């Protein structure tokens, strides 16, 4: 039971990390578009 809980927590963290990476990539893309002449 404890192991399954730890695995789920790691999975949630990975999902959150992926979400943050996507958010950062989108933010940089938008900033680059705004800065381009």
Image (spheres, helix red, strand yellow):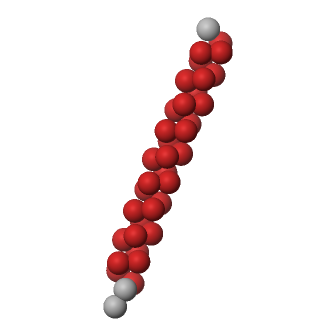
The residue furthest bottom is 37
Q: Quadrant of residue 4?
A: top right
Tell me if residue 1 comes above or below residue 36 in the rendering.
above
Tell me if residue 8 comes above or below residue 13 in the rendering.
above
Q: Quadrant of residue 13?
A: top right
Q: Quadrant of residue 25?
A: bottom left
Total marks shown come to 0
Q: Which residue is drawn at 40% across and 62% down?
A: 26
Q: Which residue is drawn at 60% across and 23% down?
A: 7
25 left or right, relative to 7? left
33 left or right, relative to 5? left
Residue 23 in the image, given as x and y percentages of width and height:
43, 56
Residue 16 in the image, given as x and y percentages of width and height:
50, 41
Q: Residue at x 40, y 70 (%)?
A: 29
3 left or right, relative to 12? right
Which of the image's four quarters has the N terminus? Answer: top right
Tell me if residue 23 comes above or below residue 9 in the rendering.
below
Which of the image's four quarters has the C terminus? Answer: bottom left
Tell me if residue 14 comes above or below residue 26 in the rendering.
above
Residue 14 in the image, given as x and y percentages of width and height:
55, 38
Residue 36 in the image, given as x and y percentages of width and height:
37, 86
């Amino acid at each position: 039971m404890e192991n399954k809980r730890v695995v789920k927590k790691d999975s949630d963290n990975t999902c959150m990390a992926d979400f943050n990476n996507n958010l950062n990539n989108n933010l940089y893309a938008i900033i680059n578009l705004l800065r381009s002449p």
